[in-house]
Amino acid sequence: MIAGAVRRAGLVDVLGAAGNVNVQGEEQQKLDVYANEVVKSALTFTGRVCVMGSEEDDDFIPVPDGYPVGKYVVLFDPLDGSSNIDANAPVGTIFSVYSRVSDGGRGDQRDVLQPGRHQVAAGYVMYGSSVMMVYTTGHGVHGFTLDPTIGEFVLSHQRITIPPTGMYYSVNESRFGRWDRGVQLAVRGLHGDFPDQIKGKNSRYIGSLVADFHRNLVNGGIFLYPGDVKAPAGKLRLLYECAPMAFIAEQAGGAATDGVTRILDLQPEALHQRTPLVIGSRDDVEYVRRIILEQRAREGAA
Ligand code: P6P
């Protein structure tokens, strides 16, 4: 449903020009809002979920009264990167699943604010040149590609593993002047400025987390969204962007930190909490961590 809406995004304006109503006669909604409603309505009444959390909703979403309550918690970003849709760049839905920790009744804050290492499943659906679902339940990472001729997701990438080091690095270089010295030195290493430390890499940055992450997952590489002087916690959200991607990265043999600390060990304090993110090929993530720690040691000694 979301893939269909994303595919028609460019048309809706043209076809729905009269009175802002789209081709199905529905009130034309922002795609974020539409994707959010699709995911919530698909999950709320299944009897599988006790509480949900969405990037699009300020507070967490308990199952409405009168509907069966299940044992799972689902956190999701219904359409990440949607600002790229006008440019026809890939966007994605990211999801993270936990078992509830509260006993009975509707889920609550305790069920939502769990560290990423407690996830039982995580994945994303990427609306790119093809529609792919990549997920893990803790037994490796597997990719399914939607075959539109039969409307089914077909197993296309069994047991995806990320190479220990990769050819690419992905970061928004325009922030370079705002990063701390350790991050600047690490990114200069990825540029190839310190060949005795690490081989330089090619830059690839789409500005859509799912697309940038997926490239590094299948080809090897590292994605960084560091904190900076203006936003020390960075831009990306812990619960429904960084933690699910970290679970997938580790299950594929990669790694994910906030620069230094393992993402899956971070204890969330709030639903929309942000964290810096360094994720991808294991040796590349470890290189960044080492450079940051060495710089902190120098500053501590100074
Ligand atoms: P910047 C998209 O808006 C998003 O949330 C992620 O998908 C993406 O990785 C990031 O922001 C890009 O942010 O600041 O580089 O444009």
Image (cartoon, rainbow, N blue to C red):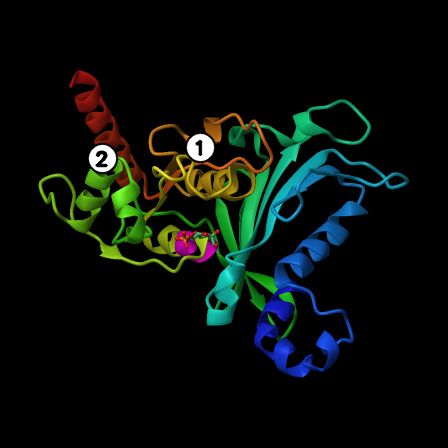
Is 191 on the left-hand or right-hand side of 122?
Answer: left
Q: Which residue is mark 1?
A: 263
Tell me the tag on residue 181: 2
Q: CA distance from mark 1 to mark 2?
A: 21 Å
Label 2 crowding class (10 Å Cα cut-off): few <14, some 14-19, many 20+?
some
Q: Does the closest atom of ligand 1 sit within 8 Å of the Cβ of label 1?
A: no
Is 202 on the left-hand or right-hand side of 80?
Answer: left
Residue depth check, mark 1 versus mark 2: number of the one nearer the observer? 2
Q: Amino acid at mark 2?
A: Arg
The x and y percentages for residue 178 are: 29, 42
Q: Residue at x 47, y 43 (%)?
A: 236
Judging depth in this view, the residue of 113 and 166 nearest the camera is 113
The x and y percentages for residue 292 are: 25, 31
Q: Outermost residue toward the top? A: 301
**What span is colored magenta in the figure?**
210-214
The x and y percentages for residue 251 are: 45, 39
Q: Quadrant of the C terminus?
A: top left
Q: Is residue 165 visible?
A: no
